Amino acid sequence: MGTFADMVLVFVLLINLVLLGSSRLASCIRQVAIQGVVLGILPILVAGDAFHLRLLVLASGVFLLKGFVFPNLLFRSMRTANTRHEATPIIGQTASVVMGVVIVVASFWLTSSLELPPAEQAASDLVVPVSLATLLTGLLLIVSRHQALSQVVGYLVLENGVFIFGAALARDEPLLVEMGVLLDVLVAVLVMGIAMFHISRTFDHIDVEQLSQLRD
Amino acid sequence: MSIIPLILTVTLAPLMLGVINRTKAVIGGRQGQPLAQPYYNLWKLLGKGAVYSHTASWVFRAGPIVTLASVLVAAALMPLGSCPSLVSFSGDLVLFAYLLGLGRFFTVTAAMDTGSAFEGMGGSREVFFSTLAEPALLLGLAAVAKKAIGTPLVSLTEIHAHVTASLWAHSGLILVFVAVAFVIVFLAENSRIPVDDPNTHLELTMIHEVMVLDHSGPDFAFILYGAALKLWVLAALIVGMVIPNTGYFIVDLPISLVGMLAVSVMVGVIESVMARLRLLRVSQLLVSATAMTALALVLEYRG
């Protein structure tokens, strides 16, 4: 529990719970940016003696992308999309936080019953539970929010969870694969921003609950 | 030596209230009340006569007495500055939580005994918030006990003795979570901002003050003194979890007293810079405190 990697992973868990409990869109975007930046620093911290220059390149890429580019895109979408800046989840905020704790407990239990190959290079034994918990939190965010922008934030949290999993079990991933994954996420967020812009221009809101009704 | 925490509690608790008021006044640019003003208030109230309504029964007269008695017994369970508490046995942390609950129950029933609508409203709010705050208290104590000792059902004195610098170095993260959750529980149980405003004069916004509206004279003195004792006891809980022990009470006792002073100043600062939250947000704040202690417990069992 005392290593730096453990503290970073627990901080990520904490940001998950804070995300589930916060309703203002601007703070959601900033929190997922902080989570992404902290996760970008994680591979450098756990490299130890296997420190390569490519880790520095990857970390700086993640820092730029998740710390500056994505928040800028999302804030721009928020401004042009004529949206209310409050996002009340469908199940209510208290229930979301309780579900978040249930997700953490379930992911710890799942990890103990999975038969994973022995990861002798894994930074700490918290990595797999935290990545599962972040994945499920991102899913919960996507499913339980009205505004399309909050669903994009949920998608970014999902991608953070996948990133943690990769950092744990695939220590020697080539740089090309990781850069490809980041490019994927960038293109996805750009496309989602364009889609939100068009939705808001047609319907004058981005509330997905109202998109399923037949009347205009 | 185990009588020392109880003596300090009984004598110094209203001083803590005075420090909070003085901090708020200094931040507000005023001179403020004398530090010993709560003592003068208690003395004045003890000399007055009490007025009882014709429709109130024995529950109304018993409420303040039972509240004060339960908080005094809870104070006998709480260690301070590596002096053991007067009474300690395995599992007394559950008794501690439920003694506070007993006091709260009698306050609420005495309030409802008056038959007034405002007291009933305050009683229902108070019970709702303590329902949300109690799991945080018990889960936090269980997490620290499990980390420090190994089984969750020990006495408060043993938990307190095990919070050392090595525990902080080894698992400081869990203690930070539990300490933050305990601060939120402290603010909720003692009806401080952001959960409740102790200075409001609008009955519609009161939670704790509205329940004691009809008490007067010595009853009101008992209630004020019991509230000061509860403030001290819960602050001693926080100080016990946060400040690492060395084991020598000559060193630890002054440090713990300084810690209590720091807690009072912190409460005064929080009261000066924040406003009371909306009632919906208060329940979310308390649920987030419970979530933090649950997270600490899960990490303890797995980490």
Image: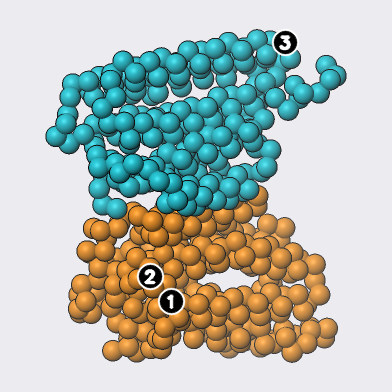
Chain colours: A cyan, B orange
Res B44 seen here: no
Name the disc covering residue B153, or none.
Answer: 1
Work out whether residue B42 or residue A2 is closer to the camera in this orientation and state it: A2
- Which numbered disc, 3 or 1, marks the residue closer to the eye? 1
Q: Is residue B81 above or below residue A188?
A: below
At horizontal 20% and vertical 78% (from top left) the residue drawn is: B248
- Numbered disc 2: what chain? B
Coordinates of residue B45 in the picture (x, y in percent): 58, 82
- Real-space Cα separation, disc 2 to disc 1, in angstroms: 7 Å
Horizontal side of residue B58 vs A152, given as left or right: right
Q: Callout 1 environment at 10 Å: few (<14), some (14 to 19), or many (20+)?
A: some
At horizontal 48% and vertical 31% (from top left) the residue drawn is: A157
SS type, badge 1: loop
Give the farthest residue toward the right.
Answer: A215
- Real-space Cα separation, disc 2 to disc 3, in angstroms: 58 Å
Work out whether residue B190 or residue B265 is closer to the camera in this orientation and state it: B190
Q: Dot 2 corresponds to which residue? A: B145
Question: Badges 3 and 1: C-beta atoms under 8 Å apart?
Answer: no
At horizontal 60% and vertical 66% (from top left) the residue drawn is: B130
Task: Please count the marks in the image.
Answer: 3
Quadrant occupied by the C terminus of chain B: bottom left
- Numbered disc 3: what chain? A
Horizontal side of residue B270 vs A79, given as left or right: left
Q: Callout 2 environment at 10 Å: few (<14), some (14 to 19), or many (20+)?
A: many
Q: Earlier in the sequence, mark 2 or mark 1?
A: 2
Question: Badges 2 and 1: C-beta atoms under 8 Å apart?
Answer: yes
SS type, badge 2: helix
Q: Dot 3 corresponds to which residue? A: A202
- Real-space Cα separation, disc 3 to disc 1, in angstroms: 61 Å
